[in-house]
Image (cartoon, helix red, strand yellow):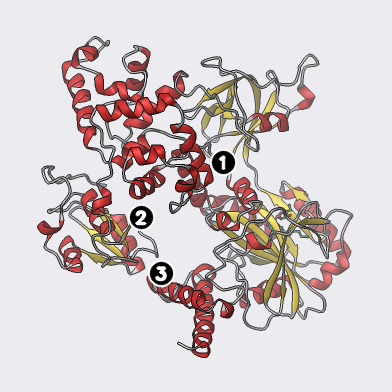
Amino acid sequence: MDKAQAKLQIDELTASLKEHNYRYYVLSEPTITDLEFDRLLKQLEYLESQFPELAHADSPTRVVGGGVLNEFQTVKHRRRMLSLGNTYNEKELREFDGRIQKAIGGETEYVCELKIDGLAISLFYEDGKLIQAVTRGDGVQGDDVTANVRTIRSLNAELHGNFPAEFEIRGEIFMHRKGFEKLNRDRIFAGETAYANPRNVASGSLKLKDSAEVAKRPLDITLYHVLGDNLSYKTHAECIEAAQSWGLKTADTTEVCRGIDEVLQFLEKWDKKRHDLGFDTDGVVIKVNSLAQQEELGYTAKVPRWAIAYKFQTESATTRLLDITYQVGRTGAITPVAELEPVFIMGTTVKRASLHNANEIERLDVRVGDMVFVEKGGEIIPKITGVDFSQRSESSRPTQYINHCPECGTALVRKEGEAQHYCPNEDGCAPQVIGKIEHFVARKAMNIDSIGSEMAKTLYQQALVKDISDLYTLNIEDLLNLERMGEKSARNIIDGIQQSKNVPFERVLFGMGIRHIGETVAKKLAQALGNIDTLMTADKETLVGIDEIGEVIADSLVSYFSEPEHRQLVERLKAAGLQMQSQQKEQIQTGTSLSGFTFVISGVFSSMSRDEAKELIESNGGKCSGSVSSKTDYLLAGEGMGPAKLEKATQLGVKIITEEELMNMLGETPAAKISTEPNKPAQTTLF
Ligand code: IVH
């Protein structure tokens, strides 16, 4: 292909991919499948690699992030980013309306917008292109986070339609609760501590130095304030409508209300409905619609007179902090817990709340004996939002954070840049060892379901199991000596342990509970290195060379295997007969016919277990996912499949196939293709 042809194709592909990104992320109305999108993207990637000089600066191949920033530039806002006044009840809101009516001489029209709990951002567009994104900062100046903001999928970096040559638009960056929960699940599985709430993660994400990392965070944006010189719009609603027509994402919940009574109806409606939204809102912003009236009303030193926030009541209560206790997690992370005088909030009695870490205790300046405000918002874990200082006793002293482990007495450590304290005694601290045993026997690891949390604890306390390798030296007599242990249960436990010897290497590796080694990472490592010996001797450079393995994971592995006790543990596990070699290596990529397709498996199959179906798909280049989404290409349906999955698949137009059809896609007969564990009967687990 010559350069002129390449240019033509690159230009076309770039434009078309941008359009599809817009349809997918902004309109939520994709017109091509994800597979087709990926094909176009790959084609563009290829052409750009051949003719790098022809690649557009904002090419869709680049906006998924890349480039590490050393520090963020501080930028002065062209127009100050003000905050909003708050109201908490109808009376205060009517007073606000009274002030407006007095100033403009009569009733006015308002726009009501949900107040999303995220972080404010100011964007600059020139000739329809995003040129700068700045955080609110102190309102006068903020950080230039343009590279990170460009990774937000729902933000159009290039506009269409009749946009002004230059304008600023402000909005809120936030994270949906589902994305937040998934992020936390992944973190917990990797042995890291959970984030406190979606807002903190959204804000922390924007401050990450590597935009490729930001791209992995499911951030979203809503824009709500257009600013510029000589704009031709007469009302705020017109501005928002215009922004939408340029391809920018605005809220679809916004309403124009005639007079304060309609505003109150809006508030009442959303006070109930906000819990179904999937993201956190803490109130409603009420704005005078007419821009001329806004100008007339003007600003106080801090806030606009033409807008106000109405805050929803979160159910809260005041109670006494009886004590601060400290929990030690599986990875040694210390979590301070507020022990409260029981208090009834939103239908439940609250006795405990997480205080997260030492920074949070310091920020709240919370002390034992204080009366504290406890809130139960959308989150399940209640939180302490503040201290009633007026009730503090004179003799109270600031909380001294512990410096030794409450369980084993070891001096705690706190790594630079981390909020959490850790107990480093990972092999001798009871909750850490018990936690490791629990993790090892979990379904996704060794799947020894005859051992639950209580049994793990008992085995450790009775000195029968001091580390996970001791499970394999247990015998029936040991167990029968335990209180209330019958022959049948003891046999189940021993059988479960024996069966776990067939569990594939990647799950053994995950089960070992090495910090930062979650399920996916363990799989990657097992595939890339094949066996435990190669992994144990791999240096940092080798490890970071593996797909998806970063420095943090590599450091964690090198440090783990540098301990002689850990190497000895591995030897004991090997001697016990556990799988320390990947079967996957020989199995993977036996074909590529499913490459680029994502499957969801549901139900029971006659010729294979669900795990085998998954292996079969993956070994032929396909991907498997747990839930049906617009990214799903095929739903592999077995007998008794989940009705919710079927409904979702039908709704989204996902193709539903049988196991025979899968085999046809592979050009195989069922029996010929299943090579794994031929002696094992097909499992019949249902969802
Ligand atoms: S308007 C001068 N509209 O709330 C206008 N703010 O408490 C100021 N916020 O800093 C902002 N949703 O981060 C506005 N629809 C909305 C909003 C909104 C959330 C945030 C924003 C602001 C804070 C003020």
Determine which residue is flagged by label 3. 34
Marks 1 and 2: CB-CB under 8 Å?
no
Query: Which residue was labeled with disc 1?
Result: 195
Q: Does the closest atom of ligand 1 sit within 8 Å of the Cβ of label 3?
A: no
Q: In the image, is residue 320 above or below residue 266?
A: above
Residue nearer the viewer, 278 or 120: 120
Residue at 49% of width from left, 70% of height from top?
A: 24
Say which amino acid is labelled 2.
Ser
The N terminus - image quarter: bottom left
Q: Earlier in the sequence, mark 3 or mark 1?
A: 3
Please indicate whether residue 199 sits to the left or right of residue 463 in the image.
right
- Rendering coords of residue 453 (x, y %): 36, 25
- Kind of element beneath mark 1: loop
Q: Is residue 238 above or below residue 345?
A: below
Report if the CB atoms under discs 3 and 1 are less than 8 Å apart: no
For residue 34, what is the image quadrant?
Answer: bottom left
Q: Position of residue 290 (x, y in %)?
A: 78, 71
Would you place residue 406 above or below residue 450 in this image? above
Which kind of residue does numbered mark 1 sit on? Tyr
Q: Is residue 444 visible?
A: no
Question: What label sits on residue 642 in the rendered view?
Answer: none
Secondary structure at badge 2 equals loop
Q: Amino acid at mark 3?
A: Asp
Mark 3 and mark 1: span between their CA atoms? Answer: 30 Å
Q: Which residue is mark 2?
A: 627
**Which residue is located at x 39 percent, y 61 percent?**
629
- Between the C-alphas of marks 1 and 2, the distance is 24 Å
Relative vertical location of residue 289 with respect to residue 403 in this rendering, above or below: below
